[in-house]
Amino acid sequence: MSDSIMALMLGVSTFLGALGLIALLWGLRTGQFDDQAKFLDGARFDGEEELKDAVMMEQKKKEALERKKREKKEREKNYRPE
């Protein structure tokens, strides 16, 4: 490789590294990483009823998707151009 390509690659990689470092420092300064226990507390305090509701909602979504697929197949099957 030529020296100009190597210099360009070095410059671009240094710029991207500095950009990543600036983004990390900005995230630390603004508190983007402060919520350490959010997901653990969410799982720990989830009750049995909430979990049952979540499962029921997932089943309803699957049933609705299946119903839409069946209706689409029926429409395609009964389609008659005029």
Image (tube, rainbow, N blue to C red):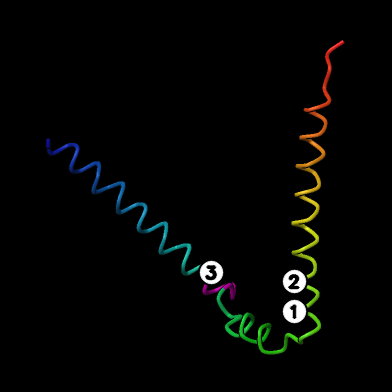
Q: Is residue 15 left or right of residue 60?
A: left
Considering depth in this image, is 19 or 35 the residue closer to the camera?
35
The residue that appears at 35% across and 52% down in the rendered structure is: 15
At mark 2, the secondary structure is: helix
The residue that appears at 35% across and 58% down in the rendered structure is: 17
The residue type indicated by label 1 comes to: Leu
Mark 1 vs 3, N-terminal side: 3
Res. 22 mark: none
Residue annotated with mark 3:
27
Residue 77: percent from left, percent from top: 78, 28
Res. 51 mark: 1
Count neighbours of disc 2 (C-alpha within 10 A) and say few if under 14, some if 14 to 19, many if 20 or more. Answer: few
The residue that appears at 75% across and 71% down in the rendered structure is: 55
Could you tell me how far apart the alpha carbons at marks 1 and 2 are, in whole angstroms? 6 Å
Considering depth in this image, is 48 or 37 the residue closer to the camera?
48
Residues marked 1 and 2 touching at CB (< 8 Å): yes
The region drawn magenta spans 27-32
